Every structure is written in structure tokens, then in C-alpha cells.
Amino acid sequence: MNSIIQIENKEDFGLVVSSRVVAEELSKRHDHVKRDLEKILISPDVGALIFESEYKDSRGRTQKEYLLTKDGFTLYMFNIQGHNDFKMNYINKFNQMEDELKNNAPKLPTTYKEALLELVAKEEENEQLRLETEISKQRINELKPKASYYDKILQNKSLVTIGQIAKDYGMSAQSLNKLLHDLKIQYKQSGQWLLYSKYHSKGLTHSDTTEIEHKDGSTSVRMHTKWTQKGRLFLYDLLKQNEVLPMIEREAS
């Protein structure tokens, strides 16, 4: 008996063993194994356990085989006397590979803070690539008008407005801006909210520039403060310390 356990992780089926492998290990003819599996497949409840597939034989011809999941393999082996070591080796290997797949599966965030931390990690991972892209765009646009430079270089899709953050807390942008002002985080100057010097260099916000065209044909620019994902996480911790939770955590508590 072949000592190498041959279980595959197929994208469409999960962990499976081929009917050809089963036939070889049991010293049976493959067509006999397929015949026995087709008898089992008569039951309508077996369809999700044993799947029909194809392979190329040594002559390049397309032949039929069956792929057995752990439960399909167990069901088939229940109908065969003996071969207990073979049965247990394969079932144990199925269980081991299932555990490995579960342990290696990416963990989904379960709280608002975990989701924000994941966003921050993703932003840091892509920061160098984004910086190189922005520098390249800046060089291309250096010969263009300043307004075009602001529009294409300073605009950052990862930024969020205070209104978007406020929505997470069931607040208006005005209310959240006032709260952050009361907490000595920001102040207003020339119509724009700016961070106090203590927080200014921490990468929490970014100034977004909008060009305004007036009726007389002249143009001017208006500055808006937007928050980075790092800043969004900073606000989460700050507001939580002041007993202000996002709506999703209030609903869960």
C-alpha cells in the first residue's frame, strides 16, 4: 500500500481524494470503484459528498473520475470490509488538513476598532507605493496650472470627511466638530478646522483643496480638512475615552 496520502485541496470542491487513488490503494480496478460510487450516488443526499470530474489518461484521452470529500470517502469505505489502517490514515489526514485550513484562514474583524486597525495596517502597507505614485504624478503635473496639481495630487481616496465619521456615531458633522473643539483637538481658522500643534504632525488629517470658479471668471481655492484612516482610529480611541461609542458598538452592547 502506498504510504503517501494523496488528498488535494480543489478550489471548487475543497479537500478531496480521487477515486483513482482509492482504487490504487485498495488494489481495485478503477472502473469497479466508479461503479460502486455510482450506486451510492443514486441517493439524492450524496451529491454534495462525491463529485464527478475528469482527467487525462496516459494516452491523453479524457476519462471520468470521482472526487470524494471526507464524508464521501467515509461513506464509501463503510461499504468495504477491512482496510482499517487505510481508512483511519485518510480520515486523520482529512481532519489534519481541515484544521490547517481553518487556522490559516484570515481572521475577520469582530469590532469597530479591529476594523479600523485593519484599515490602518492596509494603509501603511500601501503607503510607499502610493507615495511613489503621487511623486510620479506630481512630476507629470509640474508644468500644469497649480489648480490641476492640487486636484490630481493632493486628492486622496483614503481620506474621509468629518461628516462620514460623524455618521458612524449618529452625529452631525457640526456636532462632532464642536465636540473635538471642546476636547482641545482642533480650532477653526478662516473657515477651516485645523489641529492644534500637539496633533498637527501626527498624520491624522490632510488638507484637501477645491478650486472655485466665480461668475467674473476669476478662481480661488478653498481648503477642507479630511481625516486619514490613522486619524479615524485616533478619534475612535479619543471618543471612547470620553464615553462616546460608534452606533454599531452601542447596538452590540
Image: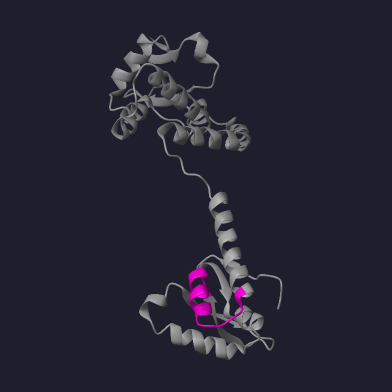
User: What percent of the width, then of the height, locates residue 51?
Assistant: 48, 76
Whether residue 208 sits left or right of residue 171 in the image: it is right
Q: Is residue 71 magenta?
A: yes
User: What percent of the width, then of the height, locates residue 18?
Assistant: 58, 76
Is residue 203 or residue 68 the one in the foreground?
68
Q: Residue at x 28, y 24 (%)?
A: 171
Residue 45, above or below 151: below
Residue 12, above or below 81: above
The C terminus lies in quadrant: top left
Q: Is residue 193 magenta?
A: no
User: What percent of the width, then of the height, locates residue 28?
Assistant: 62, 88
Whether residue 60 sits left or right of residue 38 in the image: it is right
- Give, as a single range, the part of the protein colored magenta: 68-84
Is residue 172 or residue 236 the one in the foreground?
236
- Quadrant position of residue 19: bottom right
The N terminus lies in quadrant: bottom right
Q: Residue at x 35, y 30 (%)?
A: 164
Residue 83, above or below 109: below
